[in-house]
């Protein structure tokens, strides 16, 4: 009899359920009696998720550049590891990694800046076409029975200087976000410096936390495969679009080809963003027929490649179904803004690694959100948990 039982004069209560032979209650039915109800656990988890997402939205202006820098560092980090294995000093590997990332960003930014400058210089040539387009649209609405004043209000936005004002506002917004650009470069600098020694630190951490390290390695590998596949498809799409627009005599075909390459990293709907500018120029150059031709060819080339073939290849490469990829695009764009569209797949891989792959008890969720045979998914989920050699 226990000391408390002797003090109060009554026997100690027995724990109902099956024992384990050593005087302790077995796990199972007894745990459900003293634990929280499963429904309450689900509600608490959902409440925590809502709070976490609200925090992400509040700090989106800071988190988005940091996450972009993380994705770029993860993509380029094999270069530093390769130099270290070849006997290069750590400072040289870090300098090569930083220089490579900065060079890619500088080349992309310079190409965009030069192309936009050419577009701004080209737009004054279309002042008369925009005025004619406004008059034709107003006349068409009047012919459909719309009041003349109402038709004028509806077409009032089609002003000769509207496109120029829009581009000037866009350039002003880019200049206003220069501080974010400097912040991105600073974060990239420190991440690239740490990336050189990070594999060794992961190997030491894997001894005690193999599941966590396995999830992080799965995220890094999936991000690199996603960017590799998207880059290959982006090059194909950009070259095809440039040739099509050049054959149709659309101004600045190289700019729109570059835009197609960038928007290719936006899953499922990226080609729509890249279609709007050349379609509008086609309308100004050759009327509705040329615009329809541009839209038709873009849909044939870009929709088939980016919305039919590429999602299947990307899903097999990173382990996300087409539905999960599309929903991740909507969610991360809502949370982080336009930059979330570019980071949707990598962030979904990171979330899946930290919430699903890290715990063997939750890996069944992988069968619901991943592409490919279930056996392959299970092997892929178990593989990252293997400690490094």
Image (spheres, rainbow, N blue to C red):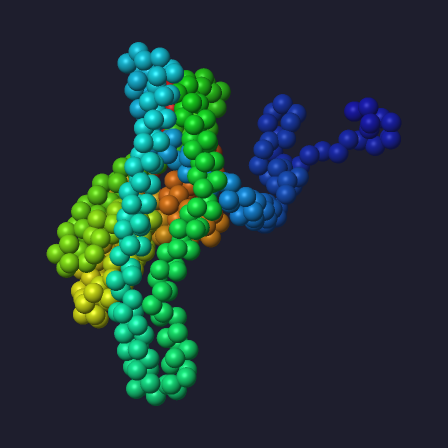
Instruction: Kindly give the residue lying farthest to the left in the view shown.
Output: 247
Is 103 drawn above or below residue 314 in the view shown?
above
Q: Is residue 243 left or right of residue 270?
A: left
**Nearer to the camera, 98 or 266:** 98
Looking at the image, residue 302 lies above or below residue 55 = below
- Residue 239 is at least partly visible in this image: yes
- Residue in the image at 45% along x and 36% along y: 182
Picture residue at 46% right of the left edge, 31% below the top = 186
Q: Quadrant of residue 357?
A: top left
Residue placed most toward the observer, 99 or 205: 99
Seen at 28% across and 42% down, the residue is 111
Which one is nearer the viewer's eye here, 180 or 320?
180
Total marks in image: 0
Task: Point out residue 3 in the picture as x, y percentages from the top left corner.
Answer: 82, 23
Q: Where residue 64 sits in the image (x, y, percent)?
A: 46, 42
Note whether 294 is above or below 313 in the view shown: below
Q: Quadrant of residue 152?
A: bottom left
Q: Quadrant of residue 380?
A: top left
Q: Nearer the viewer, residue 334 or 366?
A: 334
In the image, is 361 to the left or to the right of 309? right
Which part of the image, by quadrant, shows the N terminus?
A: top right
Image spot of residue 265 (x, y percent): 32, 45
Asked if residue 351 can be seen in this view, the reply is no
Q: Is residue 38 left or right of residue 109?
A: right
Residue 168 image position (x, y, % from top left): 39, 55
At horizontal 27% and vertical 51% (from top left) the residue drawn is: 118
State which quarter of the image contains the C terminus: top left
């Amino acid at each position: 009899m226990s000391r408390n039982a002797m003090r109060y004069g009554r026997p100690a209560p027995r724990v109902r359920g099956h024992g384990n032979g050593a005087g302790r209650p077995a796990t199972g039915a007894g745990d459900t009696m003293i634990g929280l109800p499963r429904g309450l656990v689900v509600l608490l988890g959902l409440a925590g998720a809502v709070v976490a997402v609200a925090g992400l939205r509040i700090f989106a202006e800071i988190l988005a550049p940091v996450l972009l820098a993380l994705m770029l560092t993860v993509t380029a980090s094999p270069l530093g590891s390769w130099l270290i294995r070849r006997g290069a000093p750590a400072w040289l590997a870090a300098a090569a990694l930083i220089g490579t990332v900065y060079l890619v960003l500088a080349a992309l930014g310079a190409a965009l800046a030069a192309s936009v400058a050419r577009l701004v210089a080209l737009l004054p040539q279309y002042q008369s076409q925009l005025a004619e387009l406004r008059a034709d649209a107003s006349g068409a609405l009047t012919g459909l029975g719309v009041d003349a004043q109402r038709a004028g209000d509806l077409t009032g936005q089609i002003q000769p200087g509207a496109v120029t004002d829009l581009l000037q506002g866009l350039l002003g917004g880019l200049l206003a976000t220069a501080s974010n650009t400097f912040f991105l470069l600073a974060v990239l600098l420190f991440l690239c410096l740490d990336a050189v020694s990070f594999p060794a630190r992961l190997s030491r951490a894997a001894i005690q936390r193999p599941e966590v390290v396995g999830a992080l390695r799965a995220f890094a590998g999936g991000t690199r495969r996603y960017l590799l596949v998207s880059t290959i498809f982006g090059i194909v799409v950009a070259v095809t679009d440039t040739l099509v627009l050049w054959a149709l005599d659309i101004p600045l075909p190289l700019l729109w080809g570059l835009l197609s390459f960038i928007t290719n990293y936006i899953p499922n709907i990226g080609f729509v963003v890249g279609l709007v500018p050349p379609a509008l120029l086609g309308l100004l150059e050759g009327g509705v027929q040329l615009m329809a031709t541009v839209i038709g060819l873009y849909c044939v080339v870009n929709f088939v490649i980016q919305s039919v073939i590429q999602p299947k290849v990307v899903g097999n490469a990173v382990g996300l179904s087409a539905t999960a990829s599309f929903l991740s695009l909507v969610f991360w764009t809502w949370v982080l803004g336009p930059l979330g569209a570019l980071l949707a797949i990598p962030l979904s891989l990171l979330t899946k690694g930290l919430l699903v792959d890290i715990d063997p008890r939750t890996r069944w969720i992988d069968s619901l959100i991943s592409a490919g045979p279930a056996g392959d998914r299970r092997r892929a989920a178990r593989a990252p948990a293997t400690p490094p050699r």
